[in-house]
Amino acid sequence: MDSDDNLDYYDSDYENQYSDDSDDTANLYDDEEDDSAVNPDDNSKSVKTFTVLQEDDINKRQEDQISHASLILSIPEVSASKLLYYYKWNVSQLHDEWFADEEKVRTAVGLPSDAVSISGTDELITCGICFDPFPIEEFHQMVCGHWYCKLCWKVYITTSITDGPGCLLLRCPEPSCKVAVCRDMVEELVAEEEWGKYRRYYLRSYVEESKKIKWCPMPGCENAIELELGNDLFDVACLCSGTFCWNCGQDAHRPVHCDTVAKWVSKNSSEAENTNWILAHSKPCPKCKRSIEKNHGCMHMTCTPPCNFQFCWLCQGDWREHNEKTGGFYSCNKYEVAKSKGLLDEVEKVREMAENSLNRYTHYYERWVANHKSRDKAIADLNALETGILQNLRDKTLESEGQLKFIKEAWEQIIECRRVLKWTYAYGYYIPEDEQVKKQLFEYIQGEAEAQLEKLHNQAEKELNNFLEKDEADFGVFRQKLVGLTAVSHSYFTKLVAFFETQKW
Ligand SMILES: [Zn+2]
Ligand SMILES: [Zn+2]
Ligand SMILES: [Zn+2]
Ligand SMILES: [Zn+2]
Ligand SMILES: [Zn+2]
Ligand SMILES: [Zn+2]
């Protein structure tokens, strides 16, 4: 299989990527562009499912809509800006109602068509708020003809901005007057800081009133993501490198549905007392009982000398039994209730059921957490690779950056597979007990995918280190093996995802 087939799916159409593991997506990308596979912005060659909007993009969209509305409705831009906010950026509703009854809209929004004319005067005028007399230059008069001094206006608008986004609907201070305070007045009268806040509220309204745009939930990120309508693929990737489900805001969890994720997340928090031990970094070696710390990503553990026992972090079984060479299938992912021996009285039965249900939950939770941690470790390892290890490799192998690309691709594949595998364990927990056929089929496909991923992760992690440490190691062999495992893992995970997406379970 062409190694180009291993692409981060954010760059490619989900359908192409996962519906089929043949080579038909491979030639869509030439080598040059393959490097940008993880750039979510560069999905021009495939069906776009979402768009990342930065502050400037949102601003530009608002300004474009404002000038368009100003043109169509023949009104100043400040009025168009107020109208669009009032109509929650629903342009067609604004147009319909405006052309049906312009006066009605003007009255509701507070944009009268006739201004009260202002004539110059040499006499002092009394402010309607502070009741002090001032010359006319000290006043800001609105179209309604109510007189307030500039200082009182400033205090009035600033207080409203401090109170929150309600300032966008601010009207004249005269209680019976509904004339709107427009943005040109705000800009003219308040301090720079408040004007900034006002603009920020205005900008946010565009995202918050939209049914297809949401803020990126990553801490500190101010981008928004727009989803293409009619799209039920919710995993999106922001420019901040955060990936999440657009629909429910959780970590990206395709192919598992949002409702399963929501149930699972709340289950985890209610079981936190029972499962804290799972988060520990060390476990006793099943053979010599010494405590072993897990400080790498794959689940294949090797005890320190002289024991050297190789076991599985998850089930603590002999690692050799995880290898299909022994003739058995990969079964670490399967949960089987221990059969009760002999006759139990009612009290014991109830206790055993409670124990089984906790054990069952623990089985899925442990694998969910382990894959989550393993993915985080893989992200850190890929980062370390890019910031140093690749350079060492270039020095050692004299290969070019392009020739070493397969290593980065292997790690990207591991990161994506760990994510998918993690969520399939949440799914597995909720397969009803009486659906044995479905459960067995699911566990078989999941187990096959998991076994391949463990081999790939082991190769990328430990064999790469071995290569770096040894002098006589053959790089060609290492490359061939890693490229092969990357392609095979991709293919198995394609099947796993297809299992979810082709069946309406
Ligand atoms: Zn005043
Ligand atoms: Zn007024
Ligand atoms: Zn973001
Ligand atoms: Zn979701
Ligand atoms: Zn040991
Ligand atoms: Zn195991």
Image (cartoon, helix red, strand yellow):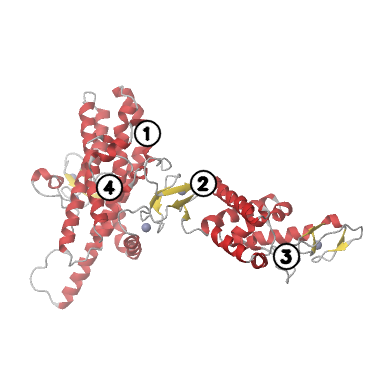
Q: Residue at image x 9%, y 73%?
A: 343
User: Pointer 1 and pointer 2: residues touching (CB < 8 Å)?
Assistant: no
Q: Residue furthest bottom?
A: 346
Question: Between tags 1 and 2, which lies in front?
Answer: 1
Q: CA distance from mark 3 to mark 1?
A: 57 Å
Q: What amino acid is at disc 1?
A: Glu
Location of residue 254 with respect to 384 vertically, above or below: below
Q: Earlier in the sequence, mark 3 or mark 1?
A: 1
Give SS at disc 2.
Answer: loop
**Residue at the disc numbered 3:** 172
Quick check: can you spot residue 165?
yes
**Residue at the disc numbered 2:** 54
Disc on res. 18: 4
Q: What amino acid is at disc 4?
A: Tyr
How many other residues sit within 10 Å of disc 3, few (<14), some (14-19) or many (≥20)? Answer: many
Q: CA distance from mark 4 to mark 1?
A: 20 Å
Location of residue 13 with respect to 388 vertically, above or below: below
Q: CA distance from mark 1 to mark 2?
A: 24 Å
Disc on res. 33: 1
How many other residues sit within 10 Å of disc 1, few (<14), some (14-19) or many (≥20)? Answer: few
Tell me if the residue at label 1 has its CB under 8 Å from ligand 3.
no
Between residues 62 and 265, which one lies in front from this camera angle?
62
